[in-house]
């Protein structure tokens, strides 16, 4: 019976977490989980946690730890048959500790990308707000400039991605991520990848995961995530 594989991907805004998660999910058949998607689903379904989360997101704030753990941990406990990769959680040490008491992670990928590169990428990032589709004018441009490929609607740039806001976001990431990274380092599961291009980092991630993930189509666990592990 193949063991279930559970991983987390971390990195500053624009480091390529979304892009790399997508490649990992395709190559290794992991289920890709995103905290932002979970929150949006809960908002759409009007759950109690979703209604509460919305009041924070609307103000540009992080959702409090107890709301995040209430939203996510039960979902992870349900994932007893599929290996997964989580993007966007944990985002604080308290979340990392709560995750830790729910299940054993096998591996954490941390992306270490120079500030200048992040600044260039994000100032070039354009979004289709209705769908969340992301473009980059150099790396993956839309077919028609300024327009979403599927709907043809106009693309916008997040205020967050403008250079003025970026310095503060990156500083915040460093402060908050450091204790989480230290925790995973001390557990011996942290793998850090540095570079300026996703296409050059990807082969290293690919070969690491090839040694770690059983390649059968489905993975079943002997040890599901449960609280109080
Ligand atoms: N030029 C360039 N752009 C890249 C590269 N890798 C990713 N991008 C683009 O950079 C932007 C950020 O990549 P994402 O995958 O959205 O990064 P993220 O870490 O998920 O970002 P957040 O959602 O803000 O946390 C997107 O517009 C990508 O298309 C790269 O190697 N070179
Ligand atoms: N782990 C988390 N802890 C607290 N808030 C979160 C977390 N993940 C997502 N959020 C909230 O949901 C919003 C959308 O998340 P996400 O899709 O990851 O986008 P972004 O890359 O803009 O942060 C965040 O801006 C934040 O308010």
Image: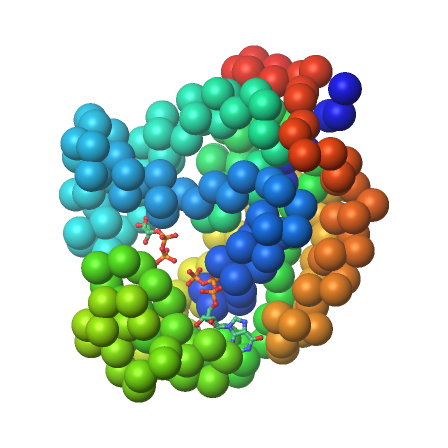
Q: Residue at position x 36%, y 34% from top?
A: 68
View extreme (right): residue: 211
Q: Does residue 159 appear anywhere in the picture?
A: no
Q: Residue at position x 25%, y 30% from top?
A: 49
**Residue 56, image x and y in percent?**
22, 45
**Frontmost residue, 180 versus 215:** 215
Image quadrant holding the C terminus, namely top right
Q: How is the image coloured?
A: rainbow
Indicate the quadrant where residue 100 lies. Answer: top right
78 sits left or right of 185 in the view: left
- Tell me: residue 57, above or below residue 4: below
**Residue 226, image x and y in percent?**
55, 16
Image quadrant holding the N terminus, namely top right
Q: Residue at position x 36%, y 26% from top?
A: 70
**Residue 63, image x and y in percent?**
30, 42
217 sits left or right of 154 in the view: right
- Tell me: residue 131, above or below residue 54: below
Indicate the quadrant where residue 188 lies. Answer: top right
**Residue 93, image x and y in percent?**
51, 40
**Frontmost residue, 159 versus 172:** 159
Q: Does residue 33 appear anywhere in the picture?
A: yes
């Amino acid at each position: 019976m193949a063991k279930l594989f559970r991983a987390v991907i971390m990195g500053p805004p624009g480091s390529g977490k979304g892009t790399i998660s997508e490649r990992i999910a395709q190559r290794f058949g992991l289920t890709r989980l995103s905290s932002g998607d979970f929150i949006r689903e809960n908002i759409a379904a009007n759950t109690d946690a979703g209604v509460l989360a919305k009041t924070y997101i609307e103000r540009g704030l992080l959702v409090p730890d107890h709301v995040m753990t209430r939203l996510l941990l039960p979902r992870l406990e349900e994932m007893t048959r599929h290996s997964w990769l989580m993007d966007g959680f944990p985002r604080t040490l308290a979340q990392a500790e709560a995750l830790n008491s729910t299940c054993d992670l096998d591996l954490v990928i941390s992306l270490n990308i120079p500030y200048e590169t992040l600044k260039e990428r994000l100032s070039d990032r354009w979004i289709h707000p209705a769908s969340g589709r992301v473009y980059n004018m150099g790396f993956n441009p839309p077919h028609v400039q300024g327009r979403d490929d599927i709907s043809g609607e106009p693309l916008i740039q997040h205020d967050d991605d403008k250079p003025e806001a970026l310095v503060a976001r990156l500083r915040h990431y460093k402060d908050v991520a450091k204790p989480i990274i230290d925790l995973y380092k001390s557990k011996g599961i942290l793998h850090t990848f540095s570079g300026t291009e996703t296409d050059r980092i990807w082969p290293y991630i690919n070969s690491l995961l090839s040694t770690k993930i059983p390649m059968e189509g489905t993975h079943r666990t002997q040890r599901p995530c449960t609280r109080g592990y």
